[in-house]
């Protein structure tokens, strides 16, 4: 396939192909305010099982203006859900726009299923990534304590992806790609001022830039409060007295009598 002269018109024309069951637009074009002159159209084409060869051959087509994913309905049902090999791509569907649904709502329902985490998914995801965040932060602070600041800085940086995964899961949300993190926090806030873009992003940048122990401990204190409030205290408590290394030093006016 060669580059269509009019990608938008070409996409609209796919509706006339009987084997096309649904069209989903993702990427920058589905995020208001994000497209640039360099943005292409990320299009997911859902087909019938017996789609013509010319249509299935379009899977993986990429050009400066068009990026195509073509899959049968059965594959779209499980796409990016737990257990699927494309689980890492789930955020692509969170704000995706449904352009066409030949099945009278079925494609839209399947798309909506991908937009947020179910309660069970959220608990598993939050628990696993919270534990990983604790592990990386603990490693960083241990290295600081033991006089290895460069290695501590690396662990601090590696803790942040786990933090973001757990933070969004604690709100039953899918972690955005880094490109959309500020957009997501600004347009769809997580709630508390602590997690708003203007507060959280500078804290992440500081940890990335310096690996500073005080910044890591202050952030952990807020994460611990949130995780306990959302019922994940068991993961925290499994670390026992090691949590003391992660917590900010107690201020005199906050010490227990």
Image: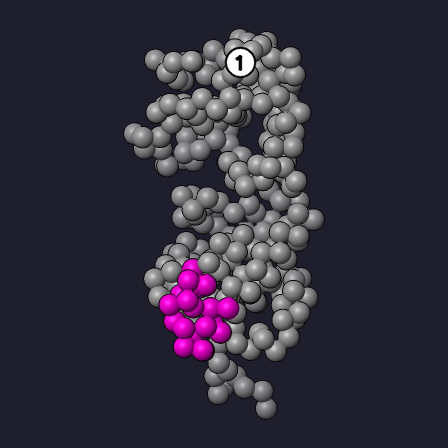
Check the picture and name the quadrant holding the C terminus: bottom right
Q: Dividing the picture into quarters, in which one does residue 143 lie?
A: bottom left
Q: Which residue is mark 1?
A: 55
Q: Is residue 99 visible?
A: no
Q: Estimate the x, y position of residue 51 in percent, counting from the top left.
A: 60, 12
| Residue nearest the viewer, comparing 139 with 188 | 139
Determine the secondary structure under disc 1. Answer: helix
Q: Is residue 122 left or right of residue 36?
A: right
Q: Is residue 33 above or below residue 217?
A: above
Q: Estimate the x, y position of residue 167 in percent, counting from the top left.
A: 54, 55
Q: Is residue 52 visible?
A: yes
Start-end of magenta stretch: 139-157
| Residue nearest the viewer, comparing 65 with 34 | 65
Main secondary structure along the magenta-highlighted residues: helix
Q: Dividing the picture into quarters, in which one does residue 108 lie?
A: top right
Q: Estimate the x, y position of residue 202 in percent, counting from the top left.
A: 37, 59
Q: Residue at x 66, y 47 (%)?
A: 121
Q: Residue at x 48, y 45 (%)?
A: 176
Residue 141 covered by magenta stretch: yes
Q: Is residue 200 above or below residue 138?
A: above
Q: Residue at x 36, y 33 (%)?
A: 35
Q: Residues within 10 Å of mark 1 (few under 14, many from 20)?
A: some
């Amino acid at each position: 396939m060669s580059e269509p002269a009019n990608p938008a018109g070409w996409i609209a024309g796919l509706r006339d192909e009987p084997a096309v069951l649904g069209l989903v637009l993702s990427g920058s074009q589905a995020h208001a305010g994000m497209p640039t002159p360099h943005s292409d159209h990320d299009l997911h084409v859902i087909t019938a099982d017996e789609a013509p060869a010319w249509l299935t051959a379009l899977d993986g087509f990429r050009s400066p203006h068009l990026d195509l994913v073509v899959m049968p309905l059965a594959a779209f049902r499980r796409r990016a859900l737990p257990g699927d090999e494309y689980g890492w791509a789930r955020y692509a569907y969170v704000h995706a726009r449904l352009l066409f649904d030949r099945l009278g709502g079925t494609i839209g329902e399947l798309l909506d299923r991908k937009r947020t985490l179910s309660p069970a998914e959220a608990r598993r995801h939050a628990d696993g990534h919270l534990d990983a965040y604790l592990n990386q932060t603990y490693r960083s602070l241990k290295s600081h304590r033991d006089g290895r600041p460069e290695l501590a800085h690396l662990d601090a940086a590696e803790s942040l992806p786990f933090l973001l995964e757990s933070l969004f899961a604690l709100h039953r949300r899918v972690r955005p790609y880094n490109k959309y993190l500020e957009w997501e926090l600004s347009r769809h806030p997580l709630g508390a001022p602590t997690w708003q873009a203007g507060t959280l992003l500078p804290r992440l940048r500081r940890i990335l830039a310096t690996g500073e122990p005080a910044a890591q401990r202050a952030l952990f204190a807020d994460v611990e409060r949130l995780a306990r409030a959302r019922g994940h205290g068991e993961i925290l408590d499994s670390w026992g007295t090691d949590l003391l290394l992660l917590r900010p030093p107690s201020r005199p006016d906050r010490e227990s009598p």
